[in-house]
Image (cartoon, helix red, strand yellow):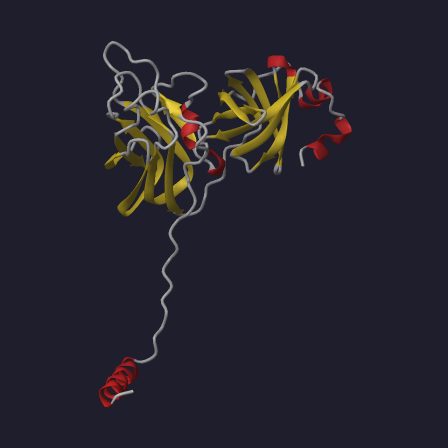
């Protein structure tokens, strides 16, 4: 090493001694859980339209790029804005939003991607306390991540679509996502036990810890599976066991049950309904429904594991 090189090294060492030991400061990890996802407790409370059961609004929060939402046919007055209200399982300090248009029908309907999207939030209720959050331009046939300038408290998110990229009839979104950290303690979930008036007639759910069983009037079906009290990951069986599938349903704080049902792993449409008063009755019970589709009543608990 040259004399000048040795002088430079000594100078660097002196600076390090004067500054003291270097201490690594760990940054707080960014929120990594999509709090809008149905599996994480997100539930759609209201929406303006959907094309049909193959393109339901719930497809926007099912965490799958295989499914997407498409708007309904436009009225004479047009179809803007399209809007949705989504409830999260508790209050969060939101840090990032995502609009994903990657797997929609842009190839057959150029310009169908949502473009101008406005977000509002509330930590009061789904009807009151709304505050404008941000208006963003989604990407055509691509994914847009929106980092918020600062965390914003919210339990309810309103999403309004004001334009697309040119298709004259429809607008589509693949996935909506939100990321943030919990604020305060999570409130107890609504008691899920009871009867629901759904789009597939009456449904009864009985919860015992993490286990859920039930039945529904249409086709005398039986359901069983797991729940945390808000998210229901269940199996359904009907027609004496000849037909079966799964469903992912989420119960809102106001008693609205909403989700999707699947057969052979393929999304078939929404399953939703409101919880009825406790005095409501139903023409089925879980044990009889289970036996009717080939389950032995003595092994129902084993079947739900």
Q: Position of residue 84 (x, y in %)?
A: 34, 26
Can you say which quadrant of the picture contains the C terminus? Answer: top right
Tag count: 0
Residue at left offset 43%, top offset 44%: 33
Q: Is residue 165 above or below residue 185?
A: above
* Depth check, front residue: 293 or 192: 293
Q: Position of residue 201 (x, y in %)?
A: 55, 14
Q: Position of residue 62 (x, y in %)?
A: 46, 32
In-image side of 118 versus 292 (left or right): left
Residue at left offset 52%, top offset 17%: 197
State which quadrant residue 168 falls in: top left
* Depth check, front residue: 247 or 6: 6
Q: Position of residue 190 (x, y in %)?
A: 50, 33
In-image side of 39 versus 103 (left or right): right
Q: Is residue 57 above or below residue 28?
A: above
Which residue, as the protein is rendered here, is positioned at the far top? 76
Q: Is residue 97 above or below residue 276?
A: below
Residue at left offset 27%, top offset 20%: 167
Which residue, as the protein is rendered here, is positioned at the far bottom? 3
Residue 130 visible within the image: no
Residue 139 visible within the image: yes
Can you say which quadrant of the picture contains the N terminus? Answer: bottom left
Q: Is residue 168 above or below residue 102?
A: above
State which quadrant residue 24 falls in: bottom left
């Amino acid at each position: 090493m040259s004399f000048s090189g040795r002088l430079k090294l000594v100078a660097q060492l002196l600076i390090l001694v004067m500054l003291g030991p270097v201490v690594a400061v760990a940054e707080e990890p960014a929120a990594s859980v999509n709090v809008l996802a149905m599996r994480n407790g997100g539930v759609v409370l209201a929406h303006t339209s959907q094309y049909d059961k193959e393109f339901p609004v719930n497809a926007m929060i099912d965490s799958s790029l295989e499914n997407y939402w498409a708007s309904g046919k436009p009225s004479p007055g047009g179809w803007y804005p399209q809007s949705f209200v989504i409830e999260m399982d508790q209050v969060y300090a939101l840090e990032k939003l995502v609009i994903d248009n990657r797997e929609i029908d842009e190839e057959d309907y150029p310009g169908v991607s949502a473009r101008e999207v406005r977000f509002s939030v509330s930590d009061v209720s789904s009807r009151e306390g709304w505050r404008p959050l941000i208006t963003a331009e989604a990407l055509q046939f691509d994914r847009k991540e929106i980092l918020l300038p600062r965390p914003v408290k919210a339990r309810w998110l309103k999403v309004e679509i004001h334009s697309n990229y040119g298709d004259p009839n429809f607008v589509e979104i693949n996935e909506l996502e939100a990321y943030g950290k919990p604020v305060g303690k999570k409130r107890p979930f609504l008691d899920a036990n009871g009867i629901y008036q759904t789009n597939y007639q009456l449904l009864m759910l009985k919860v015992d810890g993490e286990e859920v069983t039930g039945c529904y009037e249409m086709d005398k079906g039986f359901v069983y599976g797991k729940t945390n009290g808000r998210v229901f990951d269940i199996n359904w069986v009907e027609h004496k066991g000849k037909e079966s599938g799964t469903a992912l349903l989420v119960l809102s704080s106001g008693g609205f049950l909403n989700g999707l049902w699947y057969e052979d792993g393929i999304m078939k449409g929404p399953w939703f309904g409101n919880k009825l008063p406790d005095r409501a009755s139903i023409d089925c019970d879980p044990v009889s429904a289970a036996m009717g589709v080939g389950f032995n009543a003595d092994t129902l608990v084993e079947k739900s594991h």
